[in-house]
Image (tube, helix red, strand yellow):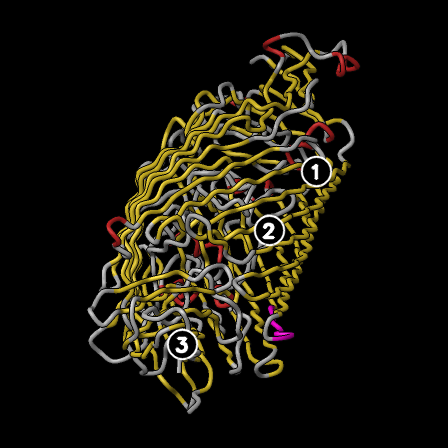
Amino acid sequence: MFVCLVVGFAAVSSGLMAQVILTGRVTNDNNAPLPQARISVKKPDGTTVTRTADPVGAFSIRLSEEGDYRLGVDRDGYFRLPERVFHLAEGPNEVHLILSPMREVFETVDVSAAHSTVSLEQVNPEQSMSAAEMLAVPFPASNTLKNAFRIMPGVVQDVRGGVHLNGGTEEQTVFLLNGFNINDPITGRFESRMGVEAVQAVDIGNGILPAQFGKGAAGTISISTTPGDDKIRYSATNFFPGFESHKGFYLGNWSPRVNFSGPIRKGRAWFSDSITVQYDKQVLEELPNGADSMSSWRIGNYLHSQVNLTPRQILYAGLLVNGWTAPRTGLGILNPRETTIDRRSNQWFFNIKDQFYLGRGSLIEFGYAANRTYGREIPQGHQMFRITPDGNSGNAYIDATRKAGRDQWLLNGIAPALTWQGTHQLKAGLDLDRLTFWQNTSRTGLEQYGPGGSLSRRVFFMGKGELSDSNVEVASYVQDSWRWKPSILVELGIRSDWDRILRSWQASPRIGFAWAPFGKTRTKLSAGYAVVHEATSLRLYSKPLDQYSVTNYFDPTGALARGPAITLFDYGASRPKSPRAQNWSTGFEQEWVNGASLRMGYLRRRGTRGFTYTDRLPYGPAPAEVSFQSPHVFDAVYTLGNDRRDVFDSFEVTLRQSLRKQYGWLASYTRSRALSNGVVDVNIDDPTTVLKNVGPMPWDAPHRFLGWAYLPLPWKDWAVATMVETRSGFPFSIQGGDGAVRAVNSERFPAFFALNLHGERRFAFRGHRWEFRAGVNNLTNHSNPNVVNGNIDSQNFMHFYGGQRRSVNFRIRWLGKITR
């Protein structure tokens, strides 16, 4: 069975005559609480009362009289418990509701996958996607979880694979793995790799975040994984390699994945283990044979466990290990093999959390996580890197080793509900992080050539490339979820952040409300305001400790026209302030009885005091602290300050429907804009010169439509899966022959359109369950280029390249042995 219900009645005669009080908890199979589960009680007269479980899974409902009631419960990522009739007596009645996690349905039992959108226990409109849904949608490169984020409204994936929530940079999103920060300690991005099968659900929190979450102006992407249950489960995906015939016969992309889960001790301890291997090979049509391909290997393993030490104490632990080797990274029509870099990286992430349920809706948890990363970049040689209007040659000029780490300690507590002018659920916590960063980098140099092959500039790098830096972050918060009336929720929160680099405390107030008008429990209006402070990036803050560049400029005859001219990065005279964003949101949510729902929302974000490096030379002489470079001239002295401003506005409308046996569909349209005066990350490793760094962000997509569906076919065990995405083309910049960007992101790629269509068959063979899927990505073979020659001096100026053409895809999955 997919769901079970344990009910205990404690009906006593007391002073509560003619009143029924229904209380209880909602948990999963392993007794872990399920917050945000929605409980519905249908009265004898046909009206329905709904409540949403609090952070410890508890709920309480008061009813006017005893009688027969129909009780049901659902939660995203879990199978819906259908309504059943129970007789509730006067006085207290207690229930324990148990939901089973949503796994892929193979049996013929007619169950439904829950998807509830309207919750009056939270103000922040939250999206959720289960692993079963992510496995059903045919998104491109479905071998990694990171690529699955793009099937959720509000998330855009750029041409390099980075994910951007609500128009923000990747480091403006907090990525959480089972409640712990998993952003890369150096870049702040989501660099980890894990298979979709390891995941229970992915939840996205937009701009009006509870005070528990900070340092994420764009929002949060929270990943929860499955710990297993009392049944041994195993599956394997794409275990047969594929071959391709394109400019020759070769092993194509291959991404085998194996998953195991089950009990360590039945009823007490469980585990799940997900192993992923990824082999990627890319062959470029435009390059000559023998120099037209690049390949890479990734391997990852995520082990997660849960131990119920007592009925009220649960211990969670997890270990993620990633490794990657990618020779000739960066190969492209403008970058032949000798210009590429061999990349290697690895990561391990460990977390442990001890959770105590204290009764009366209270809970306390302690946790620790350690994240360690290593990266290596190796050029193909040590010749000068040569940039020409029609492409590059020579060798990449950077040879680097980088290491970073984060240690995180957290404490969260939920107090028993208080009664005063309604009910109050108080939550408070502490978060302590220590970050470290070390690098050893050496750089050779680069040459820029103009039309006709004349040398226009030559750049060398000086100084010591070895550096280290560290930071300590401390945060505390208090959050009050105030149920003023049954149909009105007000959330008030305050968060305080401090770090050792900035040495100042920053307050982040949060306020929001949700209202179910006229007692309509399937309708919600919400609005909110939040101040969110951003993290202090060690990569950004350590730039002045790195090497500096020295440039010579030449006239068309080859004679030295200017130089050597120095470019430096400097901290400045005053300590910068903490960057912050102010977020406003409004929303409307409507759910219908047939599983369909409508969501509309407007989000406005204004980022101020953002960290950026600004050239101070146009406004005065070189600072005294760099006068040792005299008598050389200066190209620029970039000083760290709070001059960056970000603008984001979006309006989104989404229709979604969940059907029986995990089928469903989604359609979403978003109108948005993402602008900044710090579009280009000015750094020593970028050879371009930016004259005016104002414009749309590289992933700005003013219009975007996203749709997907997973639907049954008339034949038993057959299904069809489709995904369509169309959006405005991403912006790009025009560059002169001297390497200077004239106008940042002033042009756009052609509009993007991709339609994927797959057919699926599930069957039993020799006592085992199997699934076979075949389909076509980019069915219309629409040209979706991702590379452009933006050099105005090139004979190939404004020529577009790359993109994923029409491709045939196959997937075979072994879903385990059939048990009776």
Q: What's the magenta region?
A: 304-310
Q: Nearer the viewer, mark 1 or mark 3?
A: 3
Q: Is residue 149 left or right of residue 721?
A: right
- Between 220 and 461, the residue placed more toward the observer is 220
Q: Residue visible at 44% across and 70% down? A: 24
- Between 675 and 758, the residue placed more toward the observer is 675
Label 2: which residue?
Answer: 181
Looking at the rendering, which quadrant does residue 764 occupy? bottom left
Q: Gap in Å between the C-alphas at discs 1 and 3?
A: 87 Å
Location of residue 809 in the rendering, given as x and y in whole percent from the top left corner: 37, 64
User: Is residue 726 at all visible to an observer of this figure?
Assistant: no
Label whose residue precedes the other's in the sequence (1 or 3): 3
- Between 731 and 327, the residue placed more toward the observer is 731
Q: Secondary structure at mark 2?
A: strand
- If the image is split into quadrants, where does the N terminus sit? bottom left
Label 3: which residue?
Answer: 13
Q: Residue visible at 40% across and 35% down? A: 584
Q: Is residue 311 left or right of residue 796?
A: right
Q: Which three-letter amino acid code belongs to the residue tagged 3? A: Ser
Label 1: which residue?
Answer: 382
**Placement of 734 over or under 666, stated as above or below:** above
Dot 2 alpha-carbon crowd within 10 angstroms: few under 14, some 14 to 19, many 20 or more: some
Residues at discs 1 and 3 in contact (Cβ within 8 Å): no
Magenta stretch: dominant SS? strand
Q: Residue visible at 31% across and 74% down? A: 82
Q: Is residue 715 left or right of residue 800?
A: left
Q: Secondary structure at mark 1?
A: loop
